Image: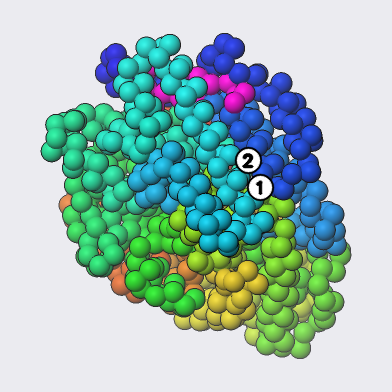
C-alpha cells in the first residue's frame, strides 16, 4: 500500500459519506431497488428461504461497488444506506423484510398486529421478533472461509440424501444456503477484478486466498470477517459482535509473528485500518467485539493480542468499535486498570461485564457453567452462546412505568383516555391497595408482551429466513434448519423491563404524601397529574426534593425495587416461549426511556408529561444524591441473577475524582466491589461540566469529545441540542 496510515486516514474516515462507486459496476441504487422489487414480485411462488436467497444473489450480482486504494479493507457496496442516520434500512431490508413483516402479520394475525401497534403508540411495550441482533459462528467463518462453508452445506445435504432423511423443509434450507454462498463467491470475484484494475496488490492477494479457501494470516482473517459481515448484513440482520476477538485471532497473530509474515508494528497498522474502517461506517449503536474472559477450562483467556488491541485503540480518538471487557476473578488487574485509564481519559466505548453474574443468570434458566462461561457479549452488553443460542435479545421492551400511569388513572391512558387492559378503581383506601393495582397492571403488561411475541413466533420463516447467517452455524447445517426456525440448541426470547427508578420513586411518593402524611387525596393527585402539574409547581418541587428515591441505598427504596423485579422475574424468567426455549429478562432501555416517556402522562415522582422515564438501572436524573457508591449498592440489593439478558449500571464521574494512581485504583476498587456484590455490568463517562458547556457553544474546539449515550458512544458535538442538555444536566446533578 502506498503511504502511511496517517497519510491514508483522511481518505478513509469519510469514505461512506462520500463514496465513489465504480462507473458501470452495477445499477444505481434507485434503479436497483425497482429491479429488486420486480424480481421479488416475479418469484413470489418460491418458498421464502429460496426467494430470499435468490433476491440476495440478484442484488450481489447487480449492486454498485467501490474499491478504496487508501485502505487495507477496500470494498464497499451501494445498498442505499444513509450512514448519517440508521444503517439498518438498506434497500434489501425495505423490499423484503419490511414488506413481508407487515404483509404476513396483517394477513395472519390482524388483531394481534393491531393491538401491538396500539401498545407501541401508547408506550406500553414494543413486542416483536428480533432478527437484527445476530452473532455468526465466527470460528467457522475463519476455519472454513466462504468456499468451505458452501462445501459444508452441500455435503450435509448429500449426507441426508444418502441416508434417506432429507425432508422438503431441509432441502429448501440447504438450497437457500447454497444459493447464497455461491452468490458470495461471485461477489468476491467481482471485487477481485476491481482490485486488479485499481492495482491494489495487497488486497488483490488477500482476495485470491479468500476465494480459494480459509484466510491464511491475520490480515486475511480480518478481511474475511468484514466481508462476511457486510454480506450477512444485507437486510436487517446485524452482526452485533465480532466475537471474542483476542481469542479468535490469536493463532493468526502468533503464527504471523513467528513466521515473519508481519511484524508487531505491521499488525498494529492492520488494526488501525480495521478500527478506522468501522469508525467510518458510523454503524448504528457501534460495532462491538469482546476481550478477556475465560477459556473452556475456566482459565484466564487474556493474551498479548488483548493488550495490543487496547494499545492501538489508545490515541486514535474514535468511539467505534466498542469493546466489551469480560471480567473474571482470573482477569489480570493490570488490564482492567488499562481499560479504566482509557475511560478516564475520554475513551468511554467500553463495557465491563461480570463473568460470574452472566454465568449465574444462565444457570437460572437451566444452562450450566461449561457452556455459559464461553458466552459472547453482543449488542449493547447482552450475552449469547455463540453457535448454540438464538436469544432474540431485542424482541421486546416493556415499560413498567406505564403500569403506574394506568393504576393512577383507573386503567386508562392519560393521553388518550383509552382503557388499555382492565378497568381499575379510581380511588384506593390504602397504599397496599394501590400497590396491588400496580402489580396487577404490570402483570397484564407482561402477559400481553409475552402473548404478542408467542403469537408472532410461528411466522418468522415467512418474514425473514436468514440463509447466510444460518450457513455459518454448525447446528443449523447439521439439522438443516434456519436459525429463525429453531436451528440452534437454545431458542430463547428476551424481554427488557424499563423504568425501575420512575416506578419506585412514584410508588414511594404516593405512599408518603397520599396515605401516610395525607397532604392530598388520591383523586387530587390524579387530577394534578392529568393537568401535568400545572398550578402545583410547589408540590412538584417538594416531591422532587424528597430524598426517599431509588439509587441512594435507602432500605425502603431498595426493597421495593427488589420486589418489583422479583415479581417480573416470576412471570418471565425461564417461562416457555413455545419455540423450545424460554424467556430471558433484562433491564436496559437503550433510547426507549425517551420514547416511552414521550408517550406517557405525568407520574407521581414529579416527572412531567412527555419527559423520559429512568434509564437502565440508573436513578432518575438528579435523584441519586448519595453518589455512585450508593447507586451501586442499590443495584446490588436486587437479585441480578434474574437478568441474563443484561443489566447495566451507568456512572458519571468528575475527572478530579479519578486523578493519578490513587484515583485510578479507587475507580478499580469501586467496580471490583460492585462485581463482588453481584453487579452485572457497568459503563460510564468521566466528564467535566465546563468542557461540555464549552463544547456546546464552540463545537469546533471539541471534534473528538465522546460521551456514552446508552450501549454505544457518540461524539458530543454530533448530538442533538436536547441530548447535549441532558448530559450537561446529568453532570450538574452529579457534581
Residue 53, numbered label: 2
Image height of 587 relative to 10, above or below: below
> How is this picture coloured?
rainbow
| Disc 1 from disc 2: Cα separation | 6 Å
Residue at position x 72%, y 48% in the image: 47
Q: Which residue position is annotated with label 1?
A: 49
Tell me the quarter of the picture where residue 219 sits. top left
Q: In the image shown, does 709 or 149 lie closer to the viewer?
A: 149
Residue located 58% across and 81% down the image: 570
Residue 238: name its quadrant. Answer: top right
Q: Which stretch did the figure color magenta? A: 61-76
Q: Residue 356: which disc?
A: none
Which residue does the image show at 64% across and 30% down from the upper left?
Answer: 58
- Can residue 682 be spotted in the picture? no
Around disc 2, counting alpha carbons within 10 Å, would you say few (fewer than 14), some (14 to 19), or many (20 or more)? many
Image coordinates of residue 635 in percent, x first then y, are: 44, 70
Residue 36, visible in the rendered structure: yes
- Which of the 4 image quarters holds residue 496? bottom right
Name the element at disc 2: helix
Q: Position of residue 114 (x, y in %)?
A: 83, 58
Q: Is residue 97 left or right of residue 188?
A: right
In screen coordinates, is 437 left or right of 554? Answer: right
Q: Tell me whether the residue at label 1 lies in contact with that at label 2, contact meaning CB atoms closer than 8 angstroms.
A: yes
Q: Nearer the viewer, residue 24 or 134?
A: 24
> 160 or 624: which is nearer to us?
160
Residue 450 part of the magenta segment:
no
Amino acid at each position: 500500500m502506498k503511504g502511511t496510515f496517517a497519510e491514508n486516514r483522511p481518505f478513509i474516515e469519510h469514505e461512506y459519506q462520500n463514496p465513489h462507486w465504480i462507473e458501470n459496476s452495477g445499477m444505481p441504487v434507485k434503479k436497483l431497488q425497482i429491479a429488486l422489487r420486480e424480481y421479488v414480485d416475479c418469484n413470489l411462488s418460491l418458498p421464502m428461504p429460496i426467494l430470499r436467497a435468490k433476491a440476495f444473489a440478484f442484488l450481489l450480482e447487480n449492486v454498485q461497488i467501490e474499491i478504496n486504494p487508501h485502505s487495507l479493507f477496500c470494498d464497499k457496496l451501494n445498498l442505499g444506506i444513509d450512514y448519517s442516520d440508521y444503517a439498518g434500512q438498506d434497500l434489501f431490508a425495505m423490499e423484503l423484510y419490511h414488506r413481508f413483516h407487515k404483509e404476513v402479520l396483517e394477513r395472519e394475525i390482524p388483531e394481534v398486529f393491531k393491538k401491538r401497534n396500539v401498545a407501541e403508540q401508547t408506550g406500553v411495550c414494543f413486542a416483536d421478533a428480533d432478527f437484527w441482533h445476530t452473532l455468526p459462528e465466527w470460528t467457522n467463518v475463519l476455519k472454513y472461509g466462504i468456499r468451505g462453508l458452501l462445501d459444508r452445506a452441500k455435503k450435509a445435504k448429500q449426507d441426508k440424501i444418502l441416508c434417506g432423511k432429507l425432508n422438503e423443509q431441509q432441502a429448501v434450507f440447504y438450497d437457500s444456503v447454497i444459493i447464497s454462498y455461491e452468490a458470495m463467491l461471485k461477489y468476491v470475484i467481482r471485487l477481485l477484478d476491481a482490485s486488479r484494475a485499481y492495482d491494489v496488490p495487497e488486497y488483490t492477494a488477500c482476495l485470491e486466498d479468500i476465494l480459494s479457501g480459509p484466510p491464511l494470516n491475520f490480515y486475511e482473517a480480518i478481511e474475511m470477517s468484514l466481508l462476511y459481515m457486510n454480506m450477512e448484513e444485507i437486510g436487517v440482520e446485524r452482526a452485533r459482535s465480532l466475537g471474542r476477538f483476542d481469542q479468535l485471532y490469536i493463532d493468526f497473530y502468533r503464527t504471523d509473528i513467528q513466521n515473519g509474515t508481519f511484524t508487531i508494528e505491521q499488525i498494529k497498522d492492520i488494526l488501525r485500518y480495521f478500527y478506522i474502517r468501522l469508525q467510518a461506517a458510523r454503524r448504528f449503536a457501534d460495532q462491538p467485539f469482546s476481550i478477556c474472559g475465560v477459556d473452556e477450562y475456566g482459565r484466564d483467556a487474556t493474551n498479548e493480542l488483548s493488550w495490543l488491541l487496547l494499545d492501538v485503540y489508545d490515541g486514535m480518538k474514535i468511539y467505534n468499535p466498542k469493546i466489551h471487557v469480560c471480567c473474571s476473578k482470573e482477569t489480570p488487574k493490570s488490564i482492567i486498570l488499562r481499560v479504566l485509564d482509557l475511560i478516564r481519559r475520554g475513551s468511554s466505548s467500553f463495557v465491563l461485564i461480570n463473568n460470574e453474574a452472566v454465568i449465574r443468570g444462565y444457570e437460572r434458566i437451566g444452562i450450566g457453567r461449561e457452556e455459559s462461561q464461553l458466552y459472547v457479549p453482543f449488542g449493547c452488553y447482552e450475552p449469547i452462546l455463540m453457535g448454540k443460542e438464538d436469544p432474540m435479545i431485542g424482541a421486546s421492551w416493556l415499560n413498567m412505568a406505564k403500569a403506574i400511569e394506568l393504576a393512577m388513572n383507573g386503567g386508562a391512558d392519560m393521553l388518550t383516555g383509552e382503557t388499555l387492559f382492565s378497568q381499575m378503581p379510581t380511588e384506593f383506601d390504602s397504599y397496599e391497595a394501590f400497590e396491588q393495582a400496580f402489580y396487577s397492571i404490570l402483570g397484564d403488561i407482561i402477559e400481553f408482551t409475552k402473548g404478542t411475541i408467542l403469537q408472532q413466533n410461528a411466522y418468522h420463516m415467512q418474514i425473514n429466513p436468514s440463509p447466510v447467517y444460518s450457513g455459518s452455524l454448525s447446528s443449523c447445517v447439521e439439522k438443516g434448519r434456519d436459525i429463525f426456525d429453531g436451528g440452534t440448541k437454545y431458542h430463547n426470547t428476551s424481554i427488557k423491563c424499563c423504568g425501575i427508578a420512575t416506578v419506585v420513586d412514584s410508588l414511594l411518593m404516593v405512599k408518603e404524601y397520599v396515605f401516610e402524611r395525607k397532604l392530598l387525596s388520591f383523586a387530587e393527585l390524579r387530577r394534578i397529574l392529568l393537568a401535568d402539574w400545572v398550578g402545583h409547581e410547589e408540590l412538584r418541587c417538594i416531591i422532587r426534593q424528597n430524598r426517599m428515591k431509588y439509587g441512594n441505598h435507602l432500605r425502603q427504596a431498595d426493597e421495593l425495587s427488589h420486589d418489583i423485579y422479583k415479581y417480573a422475574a416470576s412471570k418471565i424468567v425461564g417461562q416457555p416461549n413455545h419455540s423450545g426455549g424460554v424467556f430471558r429478562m433484562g433491564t436496559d432501555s437503550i433510547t426507549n426511556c425517551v420514547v416511552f416517556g414521550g408517550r406517557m402522562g405525568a407520574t407521581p415522582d414529579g416527572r412531567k408529561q412527555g419527559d423520559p422515564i429512568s434509564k437502565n438501572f440508573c436513578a432518575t436524573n438528579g435523584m441519586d444524591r448519595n453518589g455512585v457508591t450508593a447507586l451501586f449498592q442499590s443495584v446490588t440489593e436486587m437479585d441480578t441473577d434474574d437478568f441474563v439478558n443484561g443489566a447495566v449500571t451507568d456512572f458519571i464521574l468528575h475527572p478530579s475524582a479519578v486523578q493519578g494512581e490513587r484515583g485510578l485504583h479507587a475507580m478499580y476498587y469501586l467496580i471490583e466491589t460492585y462485581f463482588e456484590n453481584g453487579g452485572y455490568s457497568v459503563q460510564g463517562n468521566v466528564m467535566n461540566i465546563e468542557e461540555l458547556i464549552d463544547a456546546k457553544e464552540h463545537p469546533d474546539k471539541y471534534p473528538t469529545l465522546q460521551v456514552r449515550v446508552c450501549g454505544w458512544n457518540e461524539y458530543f458535538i454530533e448530538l442533538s441540542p436536547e441530548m447535549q442538555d441532558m448530559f450537561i444536566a446529568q453532570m450538574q446533578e452529579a457534581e
